Amino acid sequence: MSPDVPDNVFLQRWEKTRERLAAAGVDGILLGGGSDLAYLTGYEAMPLERITAFAGRLSPPDSKPALIVPALEAARVRPRPAVYSTQSWGDTTDPVEVIAQAIPDSGAVVVSDDLWAMHVIGLQRRVPGVALIPIGEAIGGLRELKSPAERDALAEAGSLADKVMVQIQSGEVPLVGRTEAEIAADIASRLLAAGHDTVEFIIVASGPNSASPHHHPGSRVVQADEMVLFDFGGRFNGYCSDTTRCVHTGPIPDEVRFVYTILAAAQEAAVQQARPGHSLAEVDLAARSIIAGAGFGDNFIHRTGHGIGVEVHEPPYVTELNSDPIEVGHAFSIEPGIYFPGQWGMRLEDIVVIEADGARRCNNSDRSLLEV
């Protein structure tokens, strides 16, 4: 999270969060150190057994939340007194007691989905009159609806990933004769050179490995006349990129080309379905029905997409069971895949952000299956 983000951005985010929590009928909030806490405070806590927490009450309306940090980390915190009070605790203090004083002693309090069990259980014992509810269950993702500035940030991050994908598609990145791991290291340096602040993940899956959706690039040497799947992303100014394309290291067999036409049609149908008023399940169904109708339903083995923002994976999730309505500000991947275990597989992924008139793609590299 950039330290240059002004206080008024965090105040607006907290007020929006308060409104959503109030509508859900809860009385307080507790976030452990993680992306939600950084989203509301600008502070990126170290993942330690010493808890960092964001805690607050909804009543009275003018009550100020607290950022609770271990004393040895307090010097890293940028004071934002207009946004939160800062409280530190030392090794002779029980942090659960400090947190208990910052939340209501009765009613319902939402807790971040990644809060450590040791702290949740300790708090349950300390304030038995409080019902602790996972925030995802109460209001979905805290960061689910992106502002116009956040949507633009995702588009900018996506354009940086596209630069590297174009280099792969044009043949600038040597493939045949190199290991997946060597190619992944090459891509990592190119992601940084393109402007990313960090590299978040890289998948290079060749030949039969392309049928493993989350393959880890290893020692296999890329051969001529086979599929190579690339899925990678980085972080730029706090927001993530993520894109997937496939290439073929030789003439594309008719069977492979035919299956890819099905995949591309499925992805396009899902993108067209991604608009306000439709449901996330309808987006999944748009892709899944085309793939199943062509006889490859059993070869599409994962959800159609995941939300993205300050994390690569965050709500909302595009699954056939998620009937939540799509809203302006949602941002998620659309990435159907078709996989033949032991042979080859393919996936096509773009990040989209939802505007009033539909989905805006954040990735615009060639969506064709190219021979390189």
Image: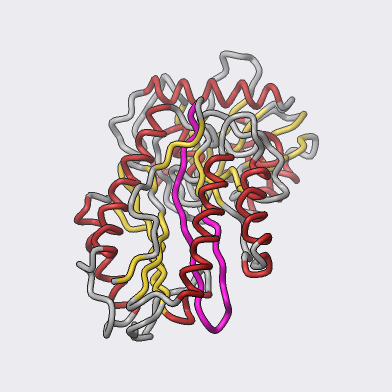
Between 150 and 37, the one lying in front of the other is: 150
What x and y, as percent, mark residue 248? 37, 73
Say which quadrant the C terminus sits in: bottom left
Does residue 119 lie above or below 372 as drawn?
A: above
Kindly identify the residue that appears in the image at 45 percent across and 46 percent down: 351
Q: Main secondary structure of the magenta part?
A: strand
Q: Is residue 354 magenta?
A: yes
Does residue 251 lie above or below 233 as drawn?
A: below
Kindly identify the residue that appears in the image at 68 percent across and 69 percent down: 298
- The image's colour scheme reads secondary structure
Asked whether, in this view, residue 28 is left or right of residue 236, the answer is: right
Q: How many marks?
A: 0
Say which quadrant the N terminus sits in: top left
In which quadrant of the rendered view does residue 368 lie?
Answer: bottom left
Q: Is residue 71 magenta?
A: no
Span colored in magenta: 335-355
Does residue 239 lie above or below 231 as drawn?
A: above
Residue extending farthest right: 129
What x and y, as percent, mark residue 185? 28, 71
Between 312 and 100, the one lying in front of the other is: 312
What x and y, as percent, mark residue 304? 59, 54
Is residue 256 among what the camera can see? Answer: yes
Kindly identify the residue that appears in the image at 74 percent across and 38 percent down: 127
Residue extending farthest front: 254
Between 15 and 124, the one lying in front of the other is: 15
In which quadrant of the rendered view does residue 63 lie?
Answer: top right
Asked whether, in this view, residue 303 is left or right of residue 168, the answer is: right
Kindly identify the residue that appears in the image at 28 percent across and 31 percent down: 4
What x and y, as percent, mark residue 69? 46, 41
Is residue 33 among what the camera can see? Answer: no
